[in-house]
Image (tube, rainbow, N blue to C red):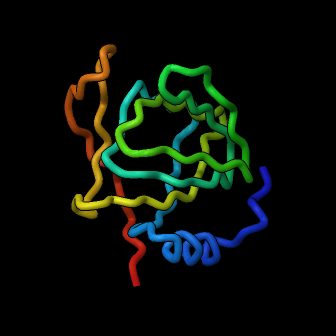
């Protein structure tokens, strides 16, 4: 699948200038499914390879392809599913008052945090 027209360096610079405090690349293995969860940070992302489906706050999943963007406010429940080729996206995170070490918070069926699983984060700071 094609890469977006925007290079990594431009995405990173634009997001840092917009007030995001970390920018990283996330790569997902084929057919990965993440059940409903939420994050303590705001996320602004650009899909750069593969395909994924994102369902936000109980709404039907949307298919995202290279060049598509998505934005999630902190603590918004969502689930993710990645295609047969996996997917890669670039994401800017705004952590607010929290530490730059971010966590993925899985939720049970009632939206209650059921534990913490760390995300592998590649910090991109000057």
Tell me which residue sits at (35%, 54%) in the image: 120
Tell me which residue sits at (30%, 15%) in the image: 110
Along the line of sight, which residue is nearer the eye, 10 or 59?
A: 59
Task: Indicate whether 96 appears above or below 31.
Answer: below
Residue 56 in picture, x, y percent from top left? 52, 30
Residue 54 in picture, x, y percent from top left? 57, 32
Tell me which residue sits at (31%, 22%) in the image: 111
Task: State left or right for residue 52 relative to residue 102.
Answer: right
Residue 60 in picture, x, y percent from top left? 61, 20
Quarter holding the C terminus is bottom left
- Which residue extends farthest bottom? 126
Task: State left or right for residue 92 relative to residue 3.
Answer: left
Task: Indicate whether 21 appears above or below 65.
Answer: below
Q: Quadrant of residue 73?
A: top left
- Which residue extends farthest top? 109
Task: State left or right for residue 80 relative to residue 4.
Answer: left
Task: Indicate whether 38 appears above or below 108.
Answer: below
Along the line of sight, which residue is nearer the eye, 118 or 44?
A: 44
Tell me which residue sits at (60%, 41%) in the image: 86
């Amino acid at each position: 699948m094609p890469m977006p027209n925007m290079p990594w360096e431009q995405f990173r610079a634009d997001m840092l200038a917009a007030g995001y405090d970390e920018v990283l690349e996330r790569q997902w293995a084929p057919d990965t499914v993440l059940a409903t969860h939420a994050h303590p940070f705001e996320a602004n992302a650009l899909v750069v390879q593969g395909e994924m489906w994102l369902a936000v706050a109980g709404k039907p999943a949307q298919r995202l392809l290279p060049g598509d963007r998505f934005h999630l406010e902190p603590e918004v429940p969502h689930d993710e599913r990645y295609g047969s080729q996996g997917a890669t996206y670039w994401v800017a995170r705004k952590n607010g008052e929290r530490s730059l070490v971010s966590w993925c918070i899985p939720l049970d069926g009632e939206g209650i945090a059921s534990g913490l699983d760390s995300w592998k984060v590649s910090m991109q700071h000057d």
